[in-house]
Image: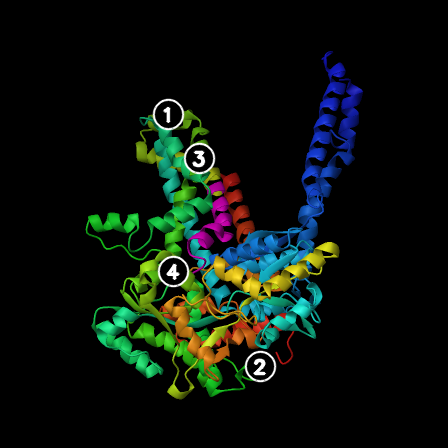
Amino acid sequence: MSGVAIARRHRAGSVYPHWFYLPAAVVYGTLFLAPTVASFYFSLTRWTLFDHEFIGLENFAVLFREPALVKGMTNTAVYAVVTSGLKVVLGLPLAVLLTSDVVGRAYLRSVVFFPVLVSTIGVGITFTVLMRPGDGLINDGLAAIGIKGPAWLTDPSYALLSVALVDVWKGVGLATLIYIAGIVSIPREYFEAATVDGAGRFAAFWHVLLPLCRPATVTVVILSLIGGLRSFDLIWTMTRGGPGFTSDVIASVIYKQYQAGFYGLSTAGNVVLFLVVTVVVLPLSLLLGRKQVEL
Amino acid sequence: MKALPPRRPRWTVVAAVLVTALALASCSPGDLGSGDGKVSLTFLVDNSDASVRPAEGLAKAFGEKYPDVQVEVEVRPQGGEGDNVVKTRLSTGDMTDVFLYNSGSLLQALKPAETLVSLKGEGFLANVQDTFFPTVSAGDGVFGVPIGGAMGGGVLYNRAVYSRLGLQVPRTWAEFMANNAKIKAAGVAPVVQTYQDTWTSQMFVLADYHNVAAAEPRFADDYTANRTSYARSPAALKGFQRLQEVHDAGYLSPDFASAKYEDGLRLLAAGQGAHFPILTFVVGTLVANHPDKVDDIGFFALPGDDAAKNGLTVWTPSGIYIPKTTGGEKLAAAKRFLAFVASPEGCAAQTKAYAPTGPYVVKDCPLPDDLPRAVKDMLPYFAAAGGTTPALEFVSPVKGPALEQITVEVGSGIRSAADGAALYDRDVEKQAKQLGLPGW
């Protein structure tokens, strides 16, 4: 490598010639940008797949009058907050446990991570069977210790939370993994210094570990919040938004419009979902990211 | 480093060989189709027993009669997912050579005049009963021939329970509710409901249409033109109210919220449930799952207010259609297949493959004598003058997609009848606008 070559590369601003970007740009453009732009247009039309008619903002007006959507938005918020909250609350202690000198640590780590690897649909079907009110294993187990379990998925007041719990079961392994990575990256010296200063285990956790693994918390919260906001597969497998509309989330409402053949309306719903996710996640990401820098 | 340059050509050769091999491999299967002068037709049907078995029976019988044509049955999901498969394949020109799909309002959403081959003027249409044509027509085209028998929407009931309690088949809603009270007192669940299969929840509304039309003969036209609706018409609202009534009276089977329709049939066959409002196509499942109880299960139409106007709401059979993408020798073969379906030979092939769920709408197609009891109970309604009315979805293109969720809510006590009907009106409005109907 001669000095001249390095200087030329620096002038170009990049190691590679610009046309190297072209294949990626073409793929990204045709598969992501073009459909996104097209979907903004189709959200303003009444679209039957065979033809479409421009109707302005009527789809959005219809969508916001839809009681299922209002219910779906509340449910989505509840679902996202419950799942991301529980993943933090359960993931952190699990990670602390699994970074300590516990017996069978490697085995326990794989056990915690295992549900992440299983297909969501498989998990959904399995838990639907386990949660059957009459003859499901969960209620049979509860009955053995004298508790009459609720109709987990068919009682309107439990359905959404039951699905959220299964989501946590499936997702907490990933949260734990992120926390484990966060915790092991904290230099041991901080803990030693804290011990020298007379801090107990709890104080070390509260004043050293917790603040220093804030990047991990940010990642877990944002990832699971986004996941919660656009959650669909598990809910669709387990309740299909039912009973009635009681466990509908934004994505399942949109999917039902699509199923019914209201393609313009469902595209409008996707635009709304896009905006909601942006509005929720962008400030959150900035806020949490800034705190991390201040630390 | 020095070893690298000579290797490059070799990798190129390997890559070239691989690409060529792949290209050749992807070429070969498509060429097998018409190599021996045989035409092969693909035939898309939904994956329910009631569709697949008659379809395969027809394909087999047709192949025996015309060895130069081979019909291959392909399956798709049922319900909304299946509708999307059909719509997507039609709009992308990827549809099979012939396909099975609902007649009535669902067919209208396929824009048949733009996507399907009109059969008007084909000789074989003369074999089909006139009542079927309105459900497969659009503009001045006729697009399908019927597959399967007509279905009744009404109440399957356990005759053993009825005779033990000394009950009579009810001809009015009041009699039905009086029977329910006695059945409940005897410790049997009066009304089986199965809300895990959400479509089953709609029967109190949809199968009540004979009674709606008896009270308001102009309902279908007014409904299509947005002059009446389920919330505005007292006769139509009754379906929702009665659904709420059976729930509020505590007449529903236990576990109705988590049961599937097979569970419902099991309760009914075992005599743990007395009534099951449903479509008669489930009789096929009943025969398969509970062969020893088939004679115990009878059928009656959903009763209304007036015993004198008692009658049955009928679901017209599905149709078989040819998309415009089918052409040439395949189109000719497809028309021969449709002619075969709409012939007495076609009916015989279907009867052999699957127990009929009701009378055929093809001329000269007698039903076998050994019909299940529930299907036999339907026949008197067809024989009586004014004894049957086609369901609303066959006389009006307007049908909202969310009815089954709304009726689950009303039937589970989550939402009131009036509220449910009003919500359904809004659902229907979306569909009507999507179809571009005048007056909406």
Foreground mark, 1 or 3, reads: 3
2 or 3: mark nearer the eye:
2
- Which residue type carries mark 4? Val
> Element under label 4?
helix
Residue A139 in picture, x, y percent from top left: 27, 51
Residue A78, can we see it?
yes
Q: Determine the CA span between mark 1 and mark 4.
A: 75 Å
Task: Using the image, name the chain to which the residue with label 1 belongs.
Answer: A
Q: Position of residue B238 (x, y in %)?
A: 41, 81
Badge 4 sits on which subunit? B
Going 37% across and 42% down the picture, which residue do you hit? A90
- Residue at which label 3 appears: A177
For the point 45% across and 53% down, the residue is: A235
Q: Amino acid at mark 2?
A: Asn
Identify residue for label 2.
Answer: B226
Q: Position of residue B20 (x, y in %)?
A: 73, 30
Q: Would you call the spot at circle 4 few (<14 residues within 10 Å), some (14-19), or many (20 or more)?
A: some
Q: Secondary structure at mark 1?
A: helix
Q: Is residue B428 left or right of residue A46?
A: left
In what quadrant of the picture does the C terminus of chain B appear? bottom right
What is the CA distance from the residue labelled 1 to the residue labelled 2?
78 Å
* Cβ atoms at labels 1 and 3 below 8 Å apart: no
Please check whether the numbered discs 4 and 2 fall on a single chain.
yes
Q: Which residues are magenta?
A: A219-243
Q: Say which element carries label 2.
A: loop
Q: Earlier in the sequence, mark 4 or mark 2?
A: 2
Residue in the foreground of this view, choosing between B426 and B216: B216
- Residue occupied by mark 4: B287
